[in-house]
Image: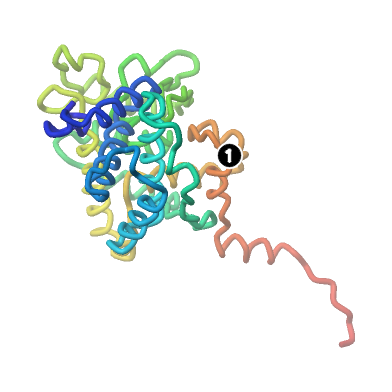
């Protein structure tokens, strides 16, 4: 329970324990369970641990304002609302209450057309060249899976040996975010890197993590924070060689943006891209349809205006 964000003093709060049971039975990932438990616990602390039946919509709205005053962004506030809604759904399931006070709480509107940060193809090549460290092959494989296969940190972390399928059409098959199965075909060059890592650098894992694809020096499954650190350290190395990128925010998720943007610029249709990214809603995929100024200029230059001779 500690690993899921439950503290010893939570054991006296049956609503939190039942919330965890509800999340587990509903098939939420471990990562989401941990985040939702944390959000619910923080909210209950704000309302001074009122009994769940005493909490009203106004309490949740006041907490939204409190979070905003502390500098929380729209995404964080919306995540809290989702977690608190689920918390009250759990209380209804366990027959402690009949109505969900968070059901009609409005979420913040997030700008949908914001252009995502990504690396162009030349920058990505330099980024991958900057990969280093004791486990260089492992680190390169991690970066490649994000930049050329679109995997999330959590998906790289959870990847198992059996998810890597060789054969005539090599691919990765794995359970992604939202318990959604993904099938990502692999380019021959990606297969080559994964094979080199497997045969030259992958350590024999401890029995408890024997199926883990990426293994740490402690012979355990490589942690999420280690994966993020690989990206951060590579980004720092890139910025030393490319000072003009010093203000560009490069993170693990930005590599996923890079994957999607590269596909779209090479003509991949939105429906196919949605499947590759594992998005449940195509509107999420549409943020990658941004067009760069350079492309706008090129498009205009292809048009030859036919103007009158005398004007």
Residue 218 in the figure: left or right of residue 236: left
Query: Is any atom of residue 123 visible in this view?
Result: no
Q: Residue furthest bottom?
A: 311
- Residue 214 in the image: state x and y as whole percent: 24, 26
User: Residue tagged by mark 1?
Assistant: 282
Up/down of 104 relative to 89, above or below:
below
- The x, y position of residue 41, in whole percent, is 24, 41
Along the line of sight, which residue is nearer the eye, 44 or 130? 44
| One can see residue 6 in this view | yes
**79 is higher (above) or lower (below) than 164:** below
**Which image quadrant is residue 171 in?**
top left
Q: Is residue 204 above or below residue 49?
A: above
Position of the C terminus by quadrant: bottom right
Give me the residue at 21% from left, 22% from top. Answer: 200
Query: In the rendering, at what x and y percent does residue 116 appear?
Result: 46, 54
* Camera-side residue of 304 and 164: 164
Above or below, comparing residue 101 to residue 113 in the picture: above
- Residue 1: x and y in percent read 18, 26
- Identify which residue is drawn at 78% across, 67% down: 304
Assign a secondary structure to mark 1: helix
């Amino acid at each position: 329970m500690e690993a899921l964000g439950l503290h010893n003093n939570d054991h006296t709060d049956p609503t939190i324990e039942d919330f965890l049971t509800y999340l587990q039975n509903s098939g939420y990932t471990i990562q989401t369970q941990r985040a939702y438990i944390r959000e619910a616990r923080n909210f209950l602390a704000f309302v001074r641990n009122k009994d769940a039946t005493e909490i009203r919509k106004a309490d949740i709205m006041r907490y939204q304002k409190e979070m905003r005053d502390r500098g929380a962004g729209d995404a964080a506030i919306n995540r809290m609302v989702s977690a608190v809604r689920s918390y009250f759904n759990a209380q209804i399931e366990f027959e402690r209450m009949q109505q969900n006070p968070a059901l009609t709480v409005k979420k913040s509107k997030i700008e949908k057309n914001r252009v995502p940060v990504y690396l162009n193809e030349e920058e990505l090549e330099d980024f991958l060249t900057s990969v280093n460290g004791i486990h260089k092959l492992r680190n390169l494989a991690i970066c490649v899976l994000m930049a050329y296969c679109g995997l999330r940190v959590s998906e790289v972390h959870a990847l198992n040996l059996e998810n890597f399928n060789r054969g005539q059409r090599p691919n990765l098959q794995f359970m992604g975010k939202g318990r959604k199965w993904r099938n990502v075909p692999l380019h021959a060059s990606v297969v080559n890197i994964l094979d080199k890592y497997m045969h030259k650098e992958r350590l024999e894992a401890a029995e408890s993590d024997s199926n883990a694809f990426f293994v740490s020096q402690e012979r355990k499954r490589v942690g999420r924070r280690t994966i993020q650190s690989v990206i951060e350290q590579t980004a720092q190395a890139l910025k030393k060689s490319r000072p003009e990128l010093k203000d560009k925010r490069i993170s693990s998720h930005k590599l996923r943006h890079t994957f999607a943007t590269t596909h779209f610029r090479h003509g991949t249709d939105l429906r196919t891209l949605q499947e590759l990214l594992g998005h449940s809603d195509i509107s999420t995929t549409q943020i990658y349809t941004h067009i760069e100024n350079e492309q706008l200029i090129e498009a205009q230059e292809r048009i030859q205006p036919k103007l009158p001779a005398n004007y």
